[in-house]
Image: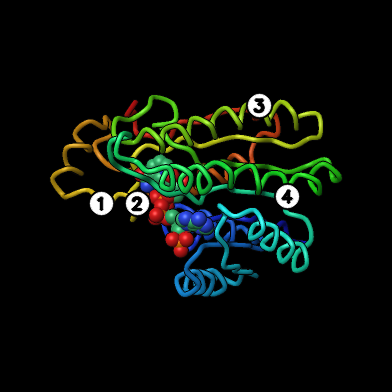
Amino acid sequence: MNKTVLVTGASRGIGHAIATAYAKKGYSIVICGRNQKTLEGAANEIRSLGADCLAVTCDVGKYDEVERLFAQASERFGAIDVLVNNAGISHIGLLQDMSIEEWNNIVNTNLSSVFSCCKLAMPDMIRRGSGSIINISSVWGVSGASCEVAYSATKGGINAFTKALAKELAPSGINVNAIACGVIDTEMNRCFSEEEIQNIIEEIPAGRMGSPDEVAALALSISEGSSYLTGQVIVLDGGYI
Ligand code: NDP
């Protein structure tokens, strides 16, 4: 039986690169995203690699939709071996200008989604005594960013969640780790002008943005590498912070 990975927010960017990397390793793939058309496009690319891929349109910020995602995944592939909580949104602006609706939306999308997916993946992992959970976080969850207070709070929450859940699940043979990304070249950063991106790059010792494939390579090495690695927030940022 192939192993199965579930990657949230995998219609583009980092999530898509992660799903592709696991597909090349022979995993069965479950992906989700809100936009059905882009999700199906991503699923077809993954299938063209020879992998079995289930694509479920789902808003991870809504618990009932995440329940539906896991029910469909379980029906198709059985238990999930690797869960990658990747789906996320950013919000740029002063905190004083943020509405409660915007706050709730980013907290639900970035943080409550991690609770929902872990809660639904964990029972099978505990029963089987194995599993790997990888949460895609951000350097802003470590250091905090001006004009990204809510985003930083959700990612800081993910980092603490990762460390705490790792302690809870280590006795069951399940690893929980996070990748705290620096600036990765995806659509999430298209809100910045070319000049702003150049200014950011000047601050990065590696002299460039990271690529989604570099995040994917790290995710794969976490889940396939040492089973003694758990509770870690691994910073992948070209020396940025
Ligand atoms: P993109 O905006 O390129 O992709 C985000 C993906 O998540 C899309 O597939 C999107 O699909 C999906 N998504 C967004 N909201 C939801 C939702 N509510 N339910 C289901 N799927 C959703 O972003 P990145 O690839 O750059 O980001 C991926 C992760 O990496 C995020 O958690 C982000 O915070 C983190 N990260 C990114 C950094 C960067 O510089 N790019 C830096 C640090 C961390 P759709 O819109 O169709 O739902």
Q: How many angstroms separate mark 4 from mark 1 (CA)? A: 33 Å
Q: How many angstroms separate mark 2 from mark 1 (CA)? A: 7 Å
Q: Amino acid at mark 1?
A: Cys
Q: Please tell me in which quadrant of the rendered image residue 159 appears.
A: top right
Check contact, mark 4 vs mark 1: CB within 8 A.
no
Q: Amino acid at mark 4?
A: Leu
Mark 2 CB within 8 Å of ligand 1 = yes
- Specify which label sits upstream in the sequence, 3 or 1: 3
Task: Identify the residue under disc 2.
Answer: 188
Residue 158, percent across and down?
Answer: 54, 34
- Specify which label sits upstream in the sequence, 2 or 3: 3
Q: Secondary structure at mark 1?
A: loop
Check contact, mark 2 vs mark 4: CB within 8 A.
no
Q: How many angstroms separate mark 2 from mark 4 (CA)? A: 27 Å
Taking the spot 30% from the left edge, 42% from the top edge, the residue there is 92
Q: Secondary structure at mark 2?
A: helix
Q: Secondary structure at mark 3?
A: helix
Q: Nearer the viewer, residue 148 or 164?
A: 148
Q: Secondary structure at mark 4?
A: helix
What number is the disc on residue 120? 4
Residue 46, placed above or below residue 211: below
Q: Nearer the viewer, residue 211 or 31?
A: 31
Residue 116, placed above or below residue 148: below
Q: Amino acid at mark 2?
A: Met
